[in-house]
Amino acid sequence: MSLRRCIDSLKFDARMLDINIKSHALTPDELKKHLASLPDLQDQTLQVDLDSSGNGRDDHFPEPEMN
């Protein structure tokens, strides 16, 4: 793949949006148009309930040993 094709493939990459807009490789209007063209996939998602205990750990694993 050529460098130009590789760069073009990252035009709408979420990690590159700020850089692409600041470098004028992408305009805010192009981004808005692209986002509007994406299909709504909400009905194909699965809601996941996370542990709300607040400890941020998975209680299924033992505590690591401290030496």
Image (tube, rainbow, N blue to C red):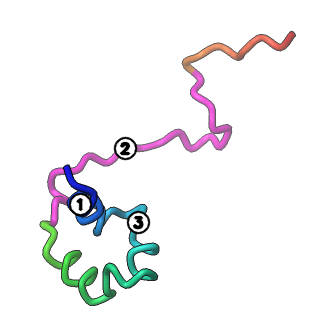
- Give percent across and percent down for residue 56: 63, 38
Identify which amino acid the numbered label 1 is placed on.
Ser
Reading the image, the residue beneath label 2 is 48
> Can you tell which of label 3 and label 2 is closer to the viewer?
3
Relative to 51, is 13 above or below? below
Q: Earlier in the sequence, mark 1 or mark 2?
A: 1
Reading the image, the residue beneath label 1 is 9
- Residue at the bottom extreme of this rendering: 29
Residue closest to the eye, 64 or 8: 8
Name the residue located 24 percent from the left edge and 84 percent from the top edge: 30
Q: Is residue 4 magenta?
A: no
Name the residue located 42 percent from the left edge and 80 percent from the top edge: 23
Q: Main secondary structure of the magenta part?
A: loop
Distance, label 1 to label 2, CA atoms, is: 31 Å
Quarter of the image for the C terminus: give it: top right
Q: Is residue 14 left or right of residue 36?
A: right
- Highlighted range, magenta: 40-59
Reading the image, the residue beneath label 3 is 16
Identify which amino acid the numbered label 3 is placed on.
Met
Identify which amino acid the numbered label 2 is placed on.
Val
Q: Earlier in the sequence, mark 1 or mark 3?
A: 1
Task: Please tell me how crowded label 1 is: few (under 14), some (14-19), or many (20+) other residues with Cα within 10 Å.
Answer: few
Residue closest to the eye, 32 or 47: 32
Name the residue located 31 percent from the left edge and 86 percent from the top edge: 27
> Can you tell which of label 1 and label 2 is closer to the viewer?
1
Q: Tag on residue 58? A: none
Relative to 15, is 47 above or below? above
Circles 1, 2 touching at the beta carbon (< 8 Å): no
